Image: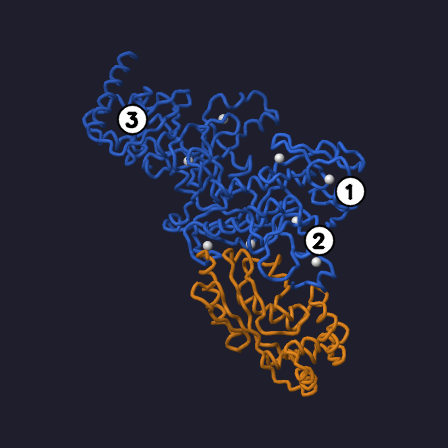
Amino acid sequence: MANIAAQRIQREFKEVIKSEEVAKCAIKVELVNDSFTELKGEIAGPPDTPYEGGNFVLEIKVPETYPFNPPKVRFITKIWHPNISSVTGAICLDILKDQWAAAMTLRTVLLSLQALLSAAEPDDPQDAVVAKQYKEQPDMFRQTAKHWTSVYAGGPAKMPELDDKIRRLTDMGVEEHNARVALSSYNWDLERATEQLFS
Amino acid sequence: MNFFFDVVLNAFIRMLQLFWFGKRRISNSLSIYVKTNEGNTLCVDLDPKWDIKNVKEVVAPRLGILPEDLKVILAGKELHNSTIIEECDLGQQSILHVVRTQPGRNRTRKLNLPQDTIEELASENSDVNESGSKPMNETLTDLPLEEAEESVTTISEQEQEENRAHFYVYCSAPCKSVQPGKLRVRCERCSSGAVTVDRDPQCWPDVLLPQRITVHCENDFCLPPLSVTHTEEIESQILYAKFYFKCANHTSLGETDESVPLYLIKPNLRKVPCLACTDIRDTVLVFPCEAGHVTCLDCFCDYCTARLHDRHFEFDTVHGYYTLPCPTGCPDSYILEVHHFHLLNAHQYEQYQRFGTEEYVLKAGGLLCPQPDCGMGIIPQSPDTDTTDEECRKIQCIGGCGYVFCRRCLQGFHVDDCETQHPVLSSSQNPATGTYAVDPLKAKDAKWDEASKKTIKVSTKPCPKCRTPTERDGGCMHIVCTRAGCGFQWCWVCQTQWTRDCMGNHWFG
Ligand SMILES: [Zn+2]
Ligand SMILES: [Zn+2]
Ligand SMILES: [Zn+2]
Ligand SMILES: [Zn+2]
Ligand SMILES: [Zn+2]
Ligand SMILES: [Zn+2]
Ligand SMILES: [Zn+2]
Ligand SMILES: [Zn+2]
């Protein structure tokens, strides 16, 4: 890795550590290796969203051309969100692509991602299934997102009804995460989810 | 009488010379040319420790005149007697201009002087010629990029010292690199260097733009005689300075040895940290944006390298330069002196030039030869309008590899229809369809892709619109072409325009 990228990341790392958001436990960043090529980020789900109470872990890879090219960021924690892949955690966000500018930092990236959790952009490139639900059945979307938050991100919500549906499928031998994905995708319609899983 | 006068004068001068060279051994001698306004050029060895008075005393006898009848001019300034040579940015074989002032003045007085000590003579003379000033390089402070408001604050000598202007140039020969530069000035009309500026430049526009600063030209033949007082005549009496730069690293190769000023490179007087690496370096590049964002030269090179790699240089729409803006994305921040890209290494600069040329060709409706090792820019004679005309479809790489190919599909030339239904791997938009639909299977087999497999990693695919190699390492399948002026949004999987279907089916693979 070029020295410049490492040096700059080190400084940004310190900036995040010292930031008030860290003091408020809203964002967090950790080193994965000594060479500053990879970091682990964490953002708290924003209040008044289905992600409230959850902690979302991010994989941050710093390219050699940083800061002239954006860091590569991916959600490690599984999340139900129209702009984030429920499968790979990939994010389609303009500032991580062509709208990146060298003045942005780890802190601004983490805060932008937190903002994305507060305000999804379903009309921008999106995870089609999630986006459709987000637009057509907002209540269902909130339920599902809350459920994913509680299961994968340590969120507080207890949703026995949804857990029950998942158990029905796992009893049939379906792996738990697959069951959750199928049910989430079919608006928790047990019959259609089953159909899809066994077709 | 006159004869006798000359004999005595010459004897005196010879003694003076002897005395000088006996007394002062020239260490580190500086070989410079002295040019007079009468057309003589002398080669003189100077000691950098001497002052201008000493110079006059060495030069004057060789011109047969008295030292106090001389004016020494360098870079638009008449130099004061007390100026030490090493304070001036003179290099080996630099040119000093010497001008005779009011010939004959003080001669009689000189003759009456006792010829015993030089010191006495010196003190006697010191009040005779006290005109002139310090050299420009001593007085000039760092020039702002824009015209600044008049600042009346007087600065201390130390601040003056710290703020002293430094110039950087690209020396195309013999150094072939970025070097410290020296500011010089000549008369805009007659090109003589024997001019004095009426004021120092205050900002870069004063230096770069014509007719900002007036000069007094010592060339007697420069000004037309002022006969009648016509308005044009008066205007013709105004002479302007023409500033230029010389490389300070190599021995001057004469008056035509000029270098391009890299005015965005500056000494980091305000100790601004580099926006990329955050180091505070001595020399930085200040972008021409309102904020004046700063990178160190290493980071500037990294920035250019990264953009070059993605072919992400842009066209400045106003002037048409193939260039880069401030890396923080400021508006109106394009680098307009593209010689700054000489900070890149020679190979990269060559690549920059090649990409630039190719982009110009594409912009002009031309295309690039599809042969792997060629890539020659070709501007076809006729536009591709007649869909049935084979001749306008047939392109030969003249001046390049000679390959004859089909303009539409960029395959070897063929008589029948192109194999694909929507052949669009051509740079110029097909006027018939106006779209860029590519058969994914064909695109995969397209020549460019074949060729690129040899040299470019598998993680690279050509932009379906402009064929620029594009890298994808992780992230989603939605690719935005990084090439200037393209920005095509395409799908990594289908290698066609990004659609809702792509989004639904394989957005993340
Ligand atoms: Zn040079
Ligand atoms: Zn002139
Ligand atoms: Zn730097
Ligand atoms: Zn800027
Ligand atoms: Zn060719
Ligand atoms: Zn063809
Ligand atoms: Zn393109
Ligand atoms: Zn696709």
The secondary structure type at the circle numbered 1 is loop
Q: Is residue A38 visible?
A: yes
Q: Count all numbered tags in the image, as a single digit.
A: 3
Tell me, yes or no, whether dots 3 and 1 are on the same chain. Answer: yes
The secondary structure type at the circle numbered 3 is helix
* Among the two numbered marks 1 and 2 on one chain, the one whose residue lies closer to the N terminus: 1
- Image vertical order of residue B416 relative to residue A35, above or below: above
Tell me, yes or no, whether dots 2 and 3 are on the same chain. Answer: yes
A155 and B416: which is toward the camera? B416
Lateral position of residue B194 relative to residue A153, left or right: left
> Label 3: which residue?
B58
Q: Chain of mark 3?
A: B
* Among the two numbered marks 3 and 1 on one chain, the one whose residue lies closer to the N terminus: 3
Residue name at image x 24 percent, y 22 percent: B112
- Image vertical order of residue B194 relative to residue B183, above or below: above
Q: Chain of mark 2?
A: B
Q: Position of residue B254 (x, y in %)?
A: 42, 27
> Label 1: which residue?
B431
Disc 2 packing (10 Å; few <14; some 14–19; many ≥20) = many
Q: Is residue B337 visible?
A: no
Q: State yes or no: Cβ of the residue under disc 2 lies below 8 Å from any atom of ligand 8.
A: yes
> Label 2: which residue?
B496
Lateral position of residue B242 relative to residue A121, left or right: left
Colour displayed for chain A in the image of the structure: orange
Q: Considering the image in quadrants, where does the C terminus of chain A appear?
A: bottom right
Which is more foreground, mark 1 or mark 2? 2
Picture quadrant of residue B100: top left
Disc 3 packing (10 Å; few <14; some 14–19; many ≥20) = many
Colour displayed for chain B in the image of the structure: blue
- Image vertical order of residue A36 relative to residue B68, above or below: below
The secondary structure type at the circle numbered 2 is loop
Lateral position of residue B499 relative to residue A58, left or right: right
